[in-house]
Structure formats: structure tokens, C-alpha cells
Amino acid sequence: MLAQIKGLHHVTSLASDARDNNAFFTNVLGLRRVKKTVNFDAPDVYHLYYGDEAGTPGTIMTYFPFQNAARGRPGAGEVGRTVFSVPTGTSRAWLDRLATFEVAGLAQDVRFGQKRVLFNGPDGDVFALVEHDDDRAPWTGNGVSADMAVRGFHSADMRLRDGAKTAELLQFMGYEKDDTEGSVTRYIVPGGNAANTIDLDVNPTASAARPGAGSVHHIAFAVANRARQLEVREALLDTGYQVTPVIDRDYFHAIYFRTPGGVLFEVATNEPGFDRDEDTAHLGQALKLPGQHEHLRARLESYLQPLED
Ligand code: ZN
């Protein structure tokens, strides 16, 4: 069993409109845009990162906004709900806030004894805020007060037809089975960051998900550094997973592999971080391009939709 993985690093999803996406995560949820760059593999598309002040691993929601992309169809084989942590007692205030912005899908529930506010993103993305004691410092620069602001990820759930092999994989990655409620089994990585929880939601008759706007593209797990990442890569290869070589994503190094349930996993390093190419006070403001795409700057700056700061 591995001990290098410390919880979530980031979650990356697809969107249909960069401006709507940016407005939702900054103005409505109050996250900070910590990086404005492009999809390194398709530089005509933004890659937008939202998180806490520094873009700390475990807080980072990222998007590829493919303009006018068709919506995905939820189903098995994908990350279903991405869950952010908010302070205990703030559900009412969040319901009111989200209603003011006419956010879709508003509802409340309780899972494993924790109160949640359920809501949808601009493309039908499935989210929740969970009341949870969390000592992470919030970003308050977008007008959500510190007493209710999002602290980062709490968890993500995966919708699967058969959870057995994914459960085995999570346990190999260092997660421990915590509890079961209905179709959902919770796994927690001991000694992890605050985003240390994964829920497996098993429904044997679910139809397969069809990816599109509002779908999670992949989910990334955090390791401290490149040495720990290589240990994880070797262990996964030894276990029979097809793992990519290490890829330099400028703000972290990444490896990817497809899980038995169909979800694309990434393992990403906590270093070097988002202040690698701009200072923390100005994160996310300028368009940042990786070296291999810098020659496209003039074209991309005229082509990509301008975003509000
Ligand atoms: Zn990623």
C-alpha cells in the first residue's frame, strides 16, 4: 500500500463558455482565479484554475472551456459530485446566496451526518458544499466573507457500476474504508490534506456517462514532489496500470492513468506551484503560456474571450 498520496490535488472539468465559467467560480462561489493559461494540448482553449489565495493543492477546481461544447450526460464511469468544504452552520447563508444568483439544482441533504447544499454549475456540473470543521484559510477577495467562504475541496464522489476494483485501487493508493450509507462507501486517506475523502457511489444499472460540458474530465491526487510521484508511478506500473510518462504542466508535474471504473486519474506534485511565473498578489490576472506555446501569444490574445478579473 502506498503512503505518498495525500488527498485531492485538483479536479478538472469541461465547460461551454469561459466567461460564464469565470463569473460563476469567482463571483458566485468566491474562489480566486489563480491561473489563466491554455490547455497545453489544445492551446486555442483556456485552462482556468480557481482555488484559495495561492492555489493550494486540495483547493483547485480547473476548467477547459470549449466554447459552445455540448453538455455531457451524467452516468457511470465518471466523477459525479465535487464537494467543497464550508464552515459549520453556513448552509442557510449559502442557500440564500446561491438563490440570489439563480443557481440551478439547489437542494439540501445529509450524508454521513454532514449537512450539504447541493447545486449545479453553469453547465449542469454537479457540486455540493458540505458543512465541515476545517482550519484552512479562505480566500475572501471576491466578496464572500471569511465566516462562510469555501475552504477548498472536501471530497469527490465517483459513480460506478461496479465499485470493487476501484475500491481496491483506492486502498492500494493509501485510502482506508471509512463508512457506508446506502449505495455510497466513503474512503479517507490517513495523514492526508484536508481534501482527503473519496466516496464511491455504486449503481449496477446506471447507463454510461457521456462526457461533455459540465463533466469532470479527470481527478488529480496530490503527492509532495517528483520523487514521491516516481515511486507511485513505479508501483502502479508494477500493479499493471498503464501510466503515462511524467508530463510537465509548469505548475506541477503530472502522470495519468485510467481506472477500472472508467475514471481518469492523475497524480500531481505539490510543487512548484502557481507562483512559479507570477507573484501571489497577481495570480490569475495575465495570460500565462507555457514555453512551447509562447510563439502563439499574439494570436491567442486576440482569439480567446477576454475575462473579467
Ligand atoms: Zn489535471
Image: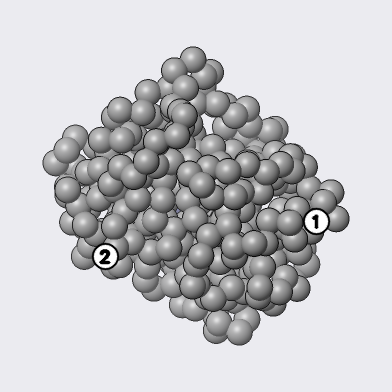
> Left of 58 or right of it: where is 303?
right
The relative height of residue 52 versus residue 130 in the rendered view (above or below) is: below
Q: Are marks 2 and 1 in contact (CB under 8 Å)?
A: no
Pinpoint residue 221: horizontal percent, then vertical percent: 37, 54
* Marker count (numbered): 2
Crowding at dot 2, Cα within 10 Å, few <14 / some 14-19 / many 20+, comes out as some
**Please, what secondary structure does the residue beneath circle 1 have?**
helix
Residue 226: mark? 2
Residue 96: mark? 1
Q: Residue at x 53, y 60 (%)?
A: 132
Name which residue type carries label 2: Arg
Q: How is the image coloured?
A: one colour
> Left of 218 or right of it: where is 298?
right
The relative height of residue 274 versus residue 190 in the rendered view (above or below) is: below
Q: Residue at x 45, y 47 (%)?
A: 219
Pinpoint residue 12: horizontal percent, then vertical percent: 53, 50
Q: Residue at x 20, y 52 (%)?
A: 2
Residue ranking furthest to the top: 205
Name which residue type carries label 1: Asp
> Left of 162 or right of it: where is 288?
right
Q: Residue at x 22, y 43 (%)?
A: 172
> Left of 70 or right of it: where is 232?
left
- In this rendering, the label closer to the viewer, 2 or 1: 1
Distance of label 2 from label 1 (alpha carbons): 43 Å
Residue 13 appears in view:
no
The C terminus is located in which quarter? bottom right
Q: Please name whichever residue, 117 or 203, is drawn nearer the observer in this view of the structure.
A: 117
